[in-house]
Amino acid sequence: MELALIEKIIALFLMLFAGFILVKKDILKKEDSQSLSKLCLYLISPCVLFHAFTVEVTPERQKAFFLCGILALGIQGFFTFFIFLLDKFFPITVVEKTAVIYSNCGNIIIPIVAYALGEDYLIYITAYIGVYNILLWTHGISLFKKQQKKMGKEGNFREENFRDYEEASLFKKLSGFLKNPNILAIIFGFLCFSFRIELPRPLGQAIKDIGGMIGPVSMMVTGMVLAKMPMENFFKNKRLFFVTFLRMVFFPLCLLFFFKLGNIAGRLPMGKEIFLVTYLSAIAPSGTSVNQFAIIYQQDAEYASCINIFTTLVAILTMPLFVYLYSWLI
């Protein structure tokens, strides 16, 4: 199973390079990625998340779902607490804090799980995504708001600019937590799962088929964005490598130790496979939402984008490696 998972991860990153080549050869433009991103965010991803709840309802699955949610909360809590302590001795920026704490557990991990483990395991990733989004839109955004107020006091932030951002449609979309189609998909999917509501077969099939596009589309979009990123941008800020080390190496190693010491996988039948979904979500590259928050709050958006893209590139090596270590140690 682990070998198949590693092969699928590599295959998905080859799709990333396909998008990279299409832009480099001027077959597509970088701007085309915006339309594909909207398609992925507002249609494909919600279909995947909703379809994840159409599995057969069993007491074992319900128990595993809630345990994955509790584990996700514990993992995010550990990340947040560690960064809080680190900031006391080695001050880091709000972009670096959020980039380390919040991973891209949706666009990259959903296709990996669907391709390698099967659709039955997608329900467990929704537990992590649910916890992740609640914390991102409460704790995560509060970090940027605090920094914005601090900049205002220091005279580096123009209040009228913030009002313009606040009135913008993008800000309204980001601040409307319950309007997020992915959150709505999880809510309605969970209700159908809990009350055993079945959709009409044609509708269910349409949702399933649309969701099947998540892998190629999301990875090619990342490759298209990467194609137009000047390589020298990655070397402007040397702290990029430290942030990448924390997100892609240090935290995955800490979680491996925790999983081994706590015998997490032994708490459920098929626990090794089920909690692998949570582990993959936690060791993913930094989240793209950090870039969006950085733009809105004027917090070095270019640096945030570099962190996101660089950690994604590093993930080509680290994710297969840590999956192998997980299979060997857990």
Image (cartoon, rainbow, N blue to C red):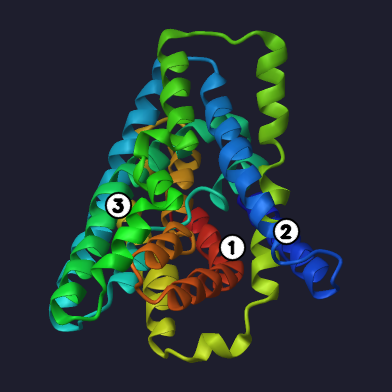
> Closest to the observer: 196 or 156?
156
Q: Mark 1 vs mark 2: which is more N-terminal?
A: 2
Give the label, 1 or 2, closer to the camera.
2
Tag 1's secondary structure?
helix
**Mark in front: 2 vs 3:** 2
The residue that label 1 is drawn on is: 320
Give percent across and percent down for residue 86: 19, 75
**Gap between marks 2 and 3 measured at Cα:** 35 Å
Q: What's the distance in space between the residues labelled 1 and 2, CA to CA?
A: 30 Å
Residue type at mark 3?
Answer: Ile
- Label 3: element kind: helix
In this view, the residue in front, 86 or 151, is 151
Amino acid type indicated by mark 2? Asp
As drawn, 234 above or below 24 = below
Residue 230 found in image quarter: bottom right
Q: Earlier in the sequence, mark 2 or mark 3?
A: 2
Residue linked to disc 3 = 75
Res 58 visible: no
The numbered disc on residue 116 is: none
In the picture provided, is 166 more to the left or to the right than 195?
left
Q: Are marks 1 and 3 in contact (CB under 8 Å)?
A: no
Give the answer, above or below, for where 303 lies relative to 208. below
Question: What number is the disc on residue 32?
Answer: 2
Residue plotted at (38% across, 61% down) = 293
